[in-house]
Amino acid sequence: MPFHSIRFKIVLWHMLILSLALFIFGTVLYHNFYLKASDDTDDILRSRAKGFEQSINTYWEAESMAIAQGNRRVHFTKEDNINFIRLARRWVEEKINDPDLINIVVRIFDAHGNPIASSRNIPIAHLNESIFHNVKKGADHFENVFLMEDEKPSSFRTLTTPVMEGRRLAYIVQVASPLSQIHTVLRSLRLSLLVLLPLTVILTGLSGVFLVQLTLKPVDQMIETIHQIRAENLKLRLKIPGTRDEIESLARTFNEMIARLDEAFTTQRQFMEDISHELKTPLAVLKGELEVTLKKIRSTQEYETAMHSILEEVDRLAGIVGNLLTLARFDAKTTELDAQPLDLNALIKDAIEVMQVLAIQKDITLQFNSAHTVDITADKNHLRRLILNLLDNAIKYTPPGGKVSVDLRQQKETVDLDIADTGVGILPKDLPHIFDRFYRIDKSRRSAGFGLGLSIAQSIALAHGGKIEARANDPQGTVFTVSLPLKPKQVIEF
């Protein structure tokens, strides 16, 4: 598995995240275990200290009763009492082999912090000043210390607790438990975590490699199919894995992209064929006119006639090239719209006046209907060209005696412009294609125009953030509806 592959990256990231999660888990587990063990040790020390205090007090009560029978004046307080000191030492000697003291060290200090007795062979010194200060106030004191036992340092957890007699400190009991058992358990836990956690990460990584290979197998199949796709076989499609996940969505998206590419290539090929066809006729006419003219010397009249014919074909070529250049600029979004507030009614009337000459020549009635003035923000020149193209198309395909009507309706945020004719109409199967470049519906329309007028009109409408649609007119003909925003949110630059 290459290091730069997505498989390696997925497995690596999975292992890193798992390692971090397990490290946090191990740290928390170790810390909580340590705190629990410490709390349990403190509870045991507190219980043992209380038990030892009660045992010593019981001994003292029995001892004081015996002493009292012989001497009524004896001093029964524990503080600075030689009898209590002897009793405490005797109690410790008797308790050395007590099961309660197997893992517990007990040491007794007097009210001044001076050592009295110890249950183990541990050097006993004067009680630490800071500890004695806290204990003298009646507070228990826990601490981890190192004590010399049999001339070897050992770690102990100690509890130093005061024994009060009234409001006065009578003596001090210190119990200690070796931390060796806790350290042993913690060491074992650390060893287990250091072995098990990396082993878990490694095993998870190995299983992750298998799962990633299994999961990305459809991707490998998709890549193999994609390598086979060329411009010549864009009909080829990826196999949908049926996994109902992102991979299936990716495969469907690729198929949709390939379908769009296929459509684009098909359109491009058709576009080139149409351009070749459109340019072929005027070029052939030009060539024929020039060949005929150059075969022999002509009169001035004949040369003038030939030049006029050539000029017409040049104008035809210039029109095709100009329209193609306009569409190319719209496609490349390099046409900058000069959007300004304008009176749409006045613009429509101006366009109708221009097209009135063609309408009169064909005996076509050209009518404009608008309830009130409509102001719109748009590029005047481009919008004028859109209206002229639609009017030219309507007049061109309306037979003599027909009618072309223009209706303007203002909506809340848009304005709708309807241009309806009573011409031959458009079949439903042709409606989705009428805005395609060089598209012509039937042979009767082949000689009319270049098939670019509607494409340009649509590009202008889209550039303004609007749209243009076509539908059948009742009872015959076609209605083109242009919908434009009154005040576009932003000027769209093309």
Image: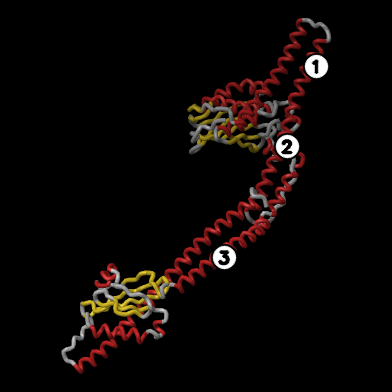
Please give the label number shown on residue 288. 1
Q: Which residue is mark 2?
A: 266
Relative horizontal placement of residue 181, taking residue 6 as reference (left or right)? left
Q: Nearer the viewer, mark 3 or mark 2?
A: 3
Which residue is located at x 59 percent, y 63 percent?
A: 199
Disc 3 element: helix
From the viewer's side, name the closer residue of 300 and 232.
232
Disc 3 versus disc 2: distance between alpha carbons?
63 Å
Tally the numbered discs.
3
Relative horizontal placement of residue 267, taking residue 350 as reference (left or right)? right
- The residue lying furthest to the bottom in this view is 69
Relative horizontal placement of residue 63, taking residue 412 as reference (left or right)? left
Location of residue 333 with respect to 248 vertically, above or below: above
Q: Which residue is mark 3?
A: 195
Pointer 3 with pointer 2, Cβ within 8 A = no
From the viewer's side, name the closer residue of 215 and 341.
215
Visible residue check, residue 76: yes
Location of residue 6 with respect to 118 vertically, above or below: above
Disc 1 versus disc 3: distance between alpha carbons?
93 Å
Q: The C terminus appears in which quarter of the rendering?
A: top right
Disc 1 element: helix
Of the residues shown, which amino acid type is indicated by label 3?
Val
Q: Earlier in the sequence, mark 1 or mark 3?
A: 3
| Residue 332 on image: x %, y % | 61, 31
Disc 1 versus disc 2: distance between alpha carbons?
33 Å
